[in-house]
Amino acid sequence: MLQIDKYKGKKVLVVGFGISGMNVAQLLVKLGADVTANDQKNDQKAAQQLQKLGIKTIIGNNPLSLADEDFDVVVKNPGIPYDMPLIAKFVKKGTPIITEVEVASEIFGGQLIGVTGSNGKTTTTTLIEKMIAQQGQRPVHYAGNIGVPFSKIAEESKQDETIVAELSSFQLLGAPTIHPHIAVITNIFSNHLDYHKTRENYINAKLNITRNQTKDDYLIMNWDREEWQQIARRSPATVVPFSRQNKSQEGSYVKDGWIYWRQERVMKVDDIRLIGPQNVENALAAIAAAKLAGVDNDSIHQVLTTFGGVRHRLQFVMEHDQRLFYNDSKSTDIEATQVALRGFNKPVILLAGGLDRGYTFERLVPDFKKHVKAIIVFGQCADKMADAAKQAQIPVINRTENCLTAVPIAWQLSAPGDVILLSPANASWDQFPNFEVRGDKFIEAVEQLTGQKEQK
C-alpha cells in the first residue's frame, strides 16, 4: 500500500456500509481521516465494529442535516443514486463525491488492469487473473465489483503485484483519478438508464476507466460494432481491438476457427471450455489483456481449456451419465437466457421461472423452438413461462415447486447427450434471497442426484 497524505486530517463521510463501505471507512482511518459513517439500515453490529476504531456512526436513516456539516469529501456506496436526497444536497454544495475504488486506486502502486462493460465483466476479469496466475511470474489478485473490495486488496498488495479489478459504471462515476495501465471495455449496451438517465451518461461513466490513461497505456475494446469503435476513439490510450467477427487484426480476433493475437495463432475456438459466442468475446478480451501483460500462449490455452465458468454464470457443474449440467442462475432476464440457449448445439432441458415482474415470455419462443426439448417451470411466473413453451410447441412441459425439485424431473426426461440447464430468465426473490443461493441449491440438488461433487 502506498502511504498518501491526501486524506490526513480531512473530514470524510462514508455513506452506505456494505462490504466496500466498511472496508474503506477503516482504511480512511489508517490514512488519517476523521471519518463519519452513515447507513439507512439499523445495523448495530457493523456500527459497533466501526465505533471501536473511533468512527462516528449514524444508522437507521440518512439525515439531511449531515449535509450541513463541513465534510471535505463523501465516499458513497456505488449503488446509491446521486438524486438520493442526502447525496443531492452534497452535489448542490459542490462537495467531492467519490466511491471506494477511487481511494483504492490512490493507494495501489502496482499494475492495475481494469475491466468494465455491460456484460461479461466478471468472466473476463476472472480469466485475466487466472491467465496471469498460470504464468506465475508475479502475484495477481482480482477485486472490485466481482465481490472482493478493491480497497482491501490494494491495502494488502505490494508494488510488484497486479490487481485485475472489475469496475461497474456506478463505481467508475465516482473514480475521477483512476488510472489502469490496461483497461478493458467488453461491450456497451443500454443498461442502468434508471440510474444514469441517458445512454450518453452511461457511456461517459464507462469511459472514466480510460480518461486518465496515456499513449503508454492500453484500452482493449470490442470492435464488432461501429458505435464501439467510435467510443474507443475518445480514449487517450493506445487502443487494442478484439473482434469475434474479424473486423480488425490489430489485437485478438477469430479467423477460420482459430483465435489469433496480431497474426499469431493462439488456439482453436472450439477448444474454449466456456459455452457460447459471448464467452468467445470474453476470451478474446482476456487474451488481449494477458498478452499485453506478458502471458505466454501455453498459460492462456491452459486456462481457456479448463475453466468451466464463473459460479452461476453459465457455469459447467458436471457431466454424469453423458448428461451435462449447467448452472446459469445469474440469468435473471429474458436476454440472458436467450444468450445461454444460443450457446448450445445439443438438446436442452430447461429449468426456468421465478419472480413475476409483470411481463410475458414470447421473445423466448424462437430460442425455445430451436434449442429446448423439454422445460420445467416454477415460481410466480410458471404459468407465463409455460404459455411461451406452448407457443414454441415444446413437447414436454412440467411444473414443479422450485429449481431443486426440478432436478430429478429433468433427469427422468433426459437422454445421453442432453444438457440440463438452469437459466431462469427471472429474479429469484419469490423463493430465494438472491440468485447465488438459488444456484447453490441447484448444485446441491445435482450433487444429491448424481452422488458426485461439482467440477471446479
Image (tube, rainbow, N blue to C red):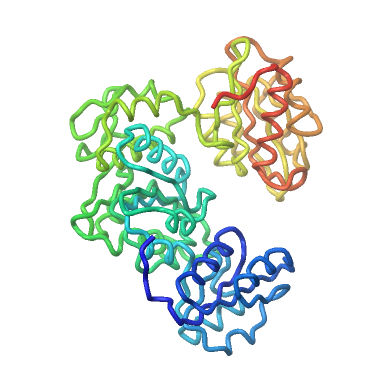
Measuring from the top left, give residue 61's x and y in whole percent: 71, 75
In the figure, 263 relative to 214: above or below? above
Vertical relation: 215 (above or below) 367:
below
- Identify which residue, 52 or 118, lies in the foreground: 52
Residue under the point 45% across and 68% down: 174
Q: Nearer the viewer, residue 183 or 207?
A: 183
User: At x 57% / y 12%, what residue is drawn?
Assistant: 417
Residue at point 41%, 66% (across, down): 175
Q: Is residue 227 visible?
A: no
Above or below, 46 relative to 111? below
Residue 142 seen by the camera? yes
In this image, 281 relative to 59: left or right? left
In the picture, residue 49 is in which quadrant?
bottom right
What residue appears at the point 32 percent right and 61 percent down from the top-left corner?
179
In this picture, is 69 found above or below 394? below
Quarter the N terminus occupies: bottom left
- The quadrant the C terminus occupies is top right
- Residue 445 screen position, x and y as percent: 72, 26
In the image, 389: left or right of 150? right
Q: Tell me where residue 374 appears, x and y as whole percent.
A: 68, 21
